[in-house]
Amino acid sequence: MGEVIVITSGKGGVGKTTTTANIGTGLAAMGYKVVLVDTDIGLRNLDVVLGLENRIVYDLVDVTSGNCRLRQALIKDKKLDGLHLLPAAQTKDKTAINPEQMRQLCADLKKEFDYIIIDCPAGIEQGFRNAIAGAEKAVVVTTPEVSAVRDADRIIGLLEAADLREPKLIINRIRPKMVRQGDMMSIDDIIDILAVDLLGVIPEDEMIVIMTNRGESVVLDQNSRSGQAYRNIVRRLTGEEVPVMNFDENEGFFKKLKKMIGIK
Amino acid sequence: MLEFLSRLFGRDSGSKNVAKERLRLVLVHDRSSVSPQLLETLKAEMIQVISNYMDVDEQGLEVNLDSSGNSVALVASIPVRGMKRKP
């Protein structure tokens, strides 16, 4: 039986979809059978982040309303055998499905996949309630900003009220240099305030933009720090103990030299 | 420019502390979120209890949650018109 994990944040634009894509790709690269479900009906994005936008025939609403069989709507990834996408509908809205249908869908997917990763829309309305309905675990993504952490706090409250206890936190787009200068909240600051367990920290990295432009996931890039950070998160999700990366050591002499002469 | 100079002389402790303080305050408020309806019920029941002992001005009664410092307080302002006669 698979495990259903919802990726949520409250605030938009903090990296939910990128995180969903990377976690899913990372798990599939480890050999697991994974399906990513985009529940952001009307604002479908996970397909382009994964580079699968040209392959969509049926979508989530087609499945829940019985227009097609579940198997017909699942899109296989180009590279990774174990990775699948169930895309959101683009022309309908959040009321096109309900929590009960999502629960049923997750139960069906659990029979076939090791991990079901659900990309939740921003906000706390019906889209959110649909996304969390079938989930057993929740991951909350935030960035080191007042607005994002505030929304994360609200989401954590709502998740716990919906019996999704002990959500795990991902802090995205941290800038180690700004943290050192005292101009950005640190990992400890945010953990202190939200009082949840940390799943991982992703440094701000141009490589994420570059990979997303191509429709690829940075988790497969062996050279970037954000890729490493996502691989660590994936391993933690599978139950491994992995220490949080130390971002301070990375600006060593050789790294700078390499950057100067353009190796990386 | 001013910011740069103060940074240069090491006076400014960084904007993170401002962010943390603002966040802390806003969360105190968010977490203690009380619906207006609950506040109204609370008011009505308070009036009921207090009017057993004194004569209060129901129109002038104000009940609010106040978050200052690091705690939340229930602040009630209840104008008293007069005391009731002891039984």
Image (cartoon, rainbow, N blue to C red):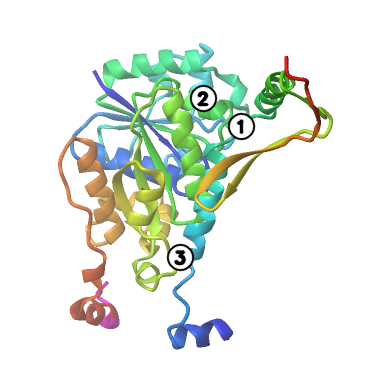
User: Which amino acid does the dot numbered 1 rest on?
Assistant: Val
Disc 2 secondary structure class: helix
Q: Residues within 10 Å of mark 3 (few under 14, many from 20)?
A: many
Front residue of A202/B6: it is B6
Residue A46 drawn above or below residue A231 = above
Q: Is disc 3 on the same chain as disc 2? A: no
Q: Which of marks 2 and 3 is in front?
A: 3
Task: Please report the residue visible at 71 percent of the width from the left and 26 percent of the height from the top.
Answer: B43
> What residue lies at 21% left-to-right and 32% top-to-bottom?
A32
Going by the image, does A99 lie left or right of A225? right
Chain letter belonging to callout 1 = B
- For badge 3, the amino acid type reads Lys
Instruction: Specify the segment rendered in magenta.
Output: A260-264
Q: Mark 2 points at which residue?
A: A129
x and y percent of residue A94 in the render? 59, 26
Cα distance in 3D space between marks 1 and 2:
22 Å
Count the marks: 3
Q: Which of B59 and B31 is in front in this view?
A: B59
* Above or below for B75 versus A261: above
Q: Which of marks 1 and 2 is in front?
A: 1
Q: In the image, residue A60 lies at what x, y percent?
A: 49, 23
Residue B85 visible in the shown view: yes
Please give the label number shown on residue A43.
none
Which residue, given by chain and number where applicable, does mark 3 sit on?
B16
Q: Are marks 2 and 3 in contact (CB under 8 Å)?
A: no
| Label drawn at residue B34 | 1
Element marked by disc 1: loop
